[in-house]
Amino acid sequence: MSRRPNTSRRLADAGSIPFISAFHPKSRPSPLLSIGLVVVGALLIIGYLYHGSGGAVDAFSRHEGGVSCTSELQRALPILQKAYGDSMQKVLHVGPDACSVVSTLLKKEGTEAWGVEPYELDETDETCKSLVYKGIVRVADIKFPLPYRSNSFSLVIVSDAVDYLSPKYLNKTLPELARVAADGLIVLSGYPGQQRAKVAELSKFGRPAKLRSSSWWVRFFTQSSLEENEVAIKKFEQAASKRSYQPACQIFHLKPLH
């Protein structure tokens, strides 16, 4: 299981920087000195933002106001492909923006991909309309059984969707997702206290996101007879380490149901 501490940092404002507040109120620093201070400050901020590529800053820069685990999945796909190898050849993605994820997966030679959009589709581009028309992406309520046979896909990846389900429905949905996966189930979920990307949550999802701790998820997996995939976890962590990748969402690797 990959975890990343949910930390936040606040940059100090100009008034709290000692060498700025130290100027005598009657003294007027030269324009060149003022410009120099501004440039130095800007460089320090830029360095802070780009330090440690793959951190949560990237996720927030892509979604002003919050984090989307589906977008985080797009960033994690190369790591997942490295960790899962041939198991990434037949993938089902379940979550918002399924068309975007499926389109990315289909660009990989030898990869088959399908998607389930658990909520209504918003404005769709021509590519998404084509995927829906061909039946590659479909809209389906994941609180009910999926229209697929057991082990239909090598790997099932779900992002964001589970954060909007109550335990009552999670008890049915996650085992159902694991049922159609031959090699494993990957779950991306937000960190507690994390601000989500701005969406019309109540109108689209019916309820605000419930962001749960990793310990809550582990207990839930155990109670639902879902076992974490230690081999996949280790391979993912090794691949992530080589690329200095730090996920902005929790990523859980589960074994399939057999």
Image (cartoon, rainbow, N blue to C red):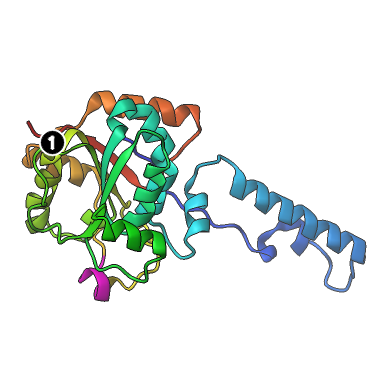
Q: Could you say where residue 39 lies in the image, as x and y percent from the top left?
A: 79, 56
Give the residue at the far bottom of this rendering. 203
Instruction: Establish if 107 lies above or below 195.
Output: above
The answer to which quarter of the image holds residue 30 is bottom right
Q: Nearer the viewer, residue 43 or 26?
A: 43
Q: Residue at x 49, y 64 (%)?
A: 64
Quadrant into which the C terminus falls: top left
Determine whether 137 is above or below 92 in the image.
below
Q: Which amino acid, mark 1?
A: Asn
Graded by Cα atoms within 10 Å as few (under 14), some (14 to 19) or many (20 or more), the crowding at tag 1 reads some
Q: Is residue 22 left or right of residue 62?
A: right
x, y percent for residue 216 = 19, 46
Q: Tell me where residue 134 sits by quadrant.
A: bottom left
Identify the residue at image location x=25%, y=76%: 203
In the displayed structure, would residue 230 be above or below residue 133? above
Front residue of this view, candidates 9 and 103: 103
The quadrant of the image that shows the N terminus is top left
Span of residues in magenta: 202-208
Where in the figure is residue 204, as x and y percent of width and height?
Answer: 26, 72
- Considering only vertical position in the picture, is 100 above or below 254? below
Q: Is residue 39 left or right of residue 122?
A: right
Q: Is residue 184 visible?
A: yes
Question: Residue at image x 7%, y 42%?
Answer: 224
> Disc 1 marks which residue?
151
Closer to the camera in the image, 91 or 173: 91
Q: Nearer the viewer, residue 185 or 182?
A: 182
**Position of residue 95 measured from the top left corner of the image (x, y, whole percent):** 27, 55
Whether residue 6 can be seen here = no
